[in-house]
Image (cartoon, rainbow, N blue to C red):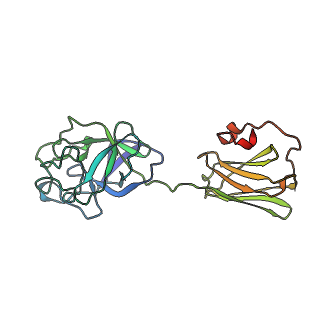
Amino acid sequence: MVATHIEGSSRRRVGRCVIGEVAMGMQPGWRWCARCSSLAYSGFGDGICVHDSAHDFGGSGEYFVSMVDVPEGSQPGWRWCNRCQCLCYSGFGDGDWCAAGGPHNFEGSGPYSVPLGAIPPSSQDGWRWCCTCLCLVYGESGGTCPSGGAHDFSRSGAYSVATAMPPPELRPSITVDRNSGMLRVDGEGFTPNARVNIRYYNDHKNLDLPTTANEIGRIAHNTGYRRAEGSCTVFARDETTGRTAIGSAGTWVPDNFPYDPVPIDQGTAFGEPDPRYE
């Protein structure tokens, strides 16, 4: 996919975007300024751009920056300047070229980090560090540095910035009941429209009955049942995320549950072997 900044009725290619989920701990509200090409926080207004003008966020989508946590492959040391609102690298001090005049002011900033090198899922590449103004700048769109000339990317690595809000973490859960002559497993929190494997385990025997979650991540699975020796544990594994919910069917098992012990390939179905299956 090619991400775009939209400027009026025109669309301009601005970089490659890798689609997928982004990590938790991301702060929204960051924007690309069409005037200076820097990444600036929009939560306190338009801020101060070059020539004492305001940042121009009109062509920008929303960006997300990791705050507090430092994801693998990211560079720490980035700070928000409370004067120009830009994201700046603080590893070499506060610089001399804030757009508001003089050095940047990082007072009130949390610790930020920016992916360096690889492009994480849902991120846009093409971002660079300007060693003159210290800001994170979209390299392909040029822009004016507060120093008055062009941004200087000669000492920069290849950075990327997240372009999507992290989805909520899926935490599947199930309930197991007998109703109208059927053993019923109801669950939620699974990946929508994805495969879910339901495993019944009793006395070193098991039966796998796959099903599919609906469009909102819920399952409803029915099967006939019979009484068993001892209790039956029910596992419902989301085959997309690997997360497993656990419930109990009491002393009941599906009516086609095996009477004799059968080999169990626990590694294939649920990852690490469960000691009860050995």
Judged left or right of residue 160, residue 273 is right
Q: Is residue 38 above or below residue 185?
A: above
The x, y position of residue 177, in whole percent, is 78, 62
The x, y position of residue 235, in whole percent, is 71, 50
Q: Is residue 135 above or below residue 262?
A: below
Judged left or right of residue 163, residue 196 is right
Q: In this rendering, does residue 10 appear at all?
A: no
The x, y position of residue 64, in whole percent, is 37, 53
Image mark count? 0
Q: In this rendering, does residue 248 appear at all?
A: yes
Q: Is residue 42 above or below residue 235?
A: below
Please identify the quadrant where the N terminus is shown: top left
The x, y position of residue 191, in whole percent, is 60, 52
Please identify the quadrant where the C terminus is shown: top right
Residue at (76%, 52%) from the top-left corner? 233
Residue at (45%, 53%) from the top-left corner? 24
In this rendered view, identify the residue nearer to me: 34 or 28.
28
The quadrant holding residue 46 is bottom left
Residue at (33%, 45%) from the top-left corner? 114
Judged left or right of residue 213, residue 35 is left
Judged left or right of residue 27, residue 144 is left
In this rendered view, identify the residue nearer to me: 13 or 44.
44
